[in-house]
Amino acid sequence: MTQYSLAAESEALTQYNSSAQAIGIFDSGIGGLSIAKCISERLPNEKLIYVADNLFAPYGDKSSATIIERVNKLADWLVAQNVKAIVVACNTATVIAIEQLRLRISIPIIGVEPAIKPAAQESIMQKIALLVTEATAVNHRFLDLVHKHKNATEVFIQPCPGLVELIEQGLHESEQCRKILNNFLIPLLEKNIDTLVLGCTHYPFVRSLIQEIVGENITIVETAQPVTEQLARQLENKGLLAAHSHISQQTFFSSDISQEQARLMSIFFGQNISLQQFPII
């Protein structure tokens, strides 16, 4: 363990008595805003620090070693900002890097994992599909989760190369996006699935287009709500929930800042966002 990570861990251990500190949230880009928005609505008194790591996006086509290295740098930076908890608002980063991250940092670390268990329980036809990034699709931890929670349900794993990039470019309502989604979804419909899991935090931003393609009879499952509830439980258990008198504040950073990104993030988060430059580390 490096001297820097030891210092970060030591600092993390001092934060348990400070409910006024912020919650750190990060993703490879704007996808994690689907989580951040849910947290903001469910925990309206909390301060949030959000990092969009666009300079290294997308994580889905990176090696595991690269993702782990980047996740550790982002988490250490957030710990240096004295956050009281970290939400890894990225499915790919969660399945690849969260276990080692929890060994390095002592504050609560909440990850985002595809909702396989509730989807399997809900499926009447016992056929579900998971839309995921390429990195998630081949990750052993993810595949172990599928095997653990699928029970008798047949599970179809569909990697979605190129989808995150379209969403990051603001093309989430374009014909190009519709075409690529058709390529991913039509074969799944032919397998008679009745439940579809959005296994990437970017994908809720194209949920309406997905629903239009698959029809109203297909149940779509997201993860923002259960992640937010898990965060709330951990904060409450450790006495870290912000008091009702605390004034909410959201601060947004990007490692590759642009006016277009700020515009898109404002649309997806539902309020005007002023982006700050994330330090290049």
Image (cartoon, helix red, strand yellow):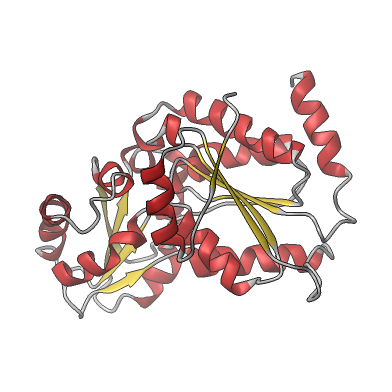
Instruction: Work out whether residue 107 or residue 35 is closer to the camera in this orientation and state it.
Output: 35
* Residue 21 in the image, given as x and y percentages of width and height: 79, 54
Is residue 239 visible in the rendered image? The answer is yes
Res. 208 image quadrant: bottom left
165 lies above or below 196: above
262 lies above or below 204: above
Residue under the point 39% across and 65% down: 151
Q: Quadrant of the N terminus?
A: top right
Res. 58 image quadrant: top left
* Residue 165 in the image, given as x and y percentages of width and height: 29, 41
Res. 61 image quadrant: top left
Instruction: Work out whether residue 123 or residue 222 is closer to the camera in this orientation and state it.
Output: 222
Q: Quadrant of the C terminus?
A: top right
Residue under the point 60% across and 73% down: 42
Residue under the point 43% across and 53% down: 265
Left or right for 194, reference 68: left
Instruction: Work out whether residue 119 or residue 27 is closer to the camera in this orientation and state it.
Output: 27
120 lies above or below 13: below
* Residue 259 in the image, given as x and y percentages of width and height: 40, 43
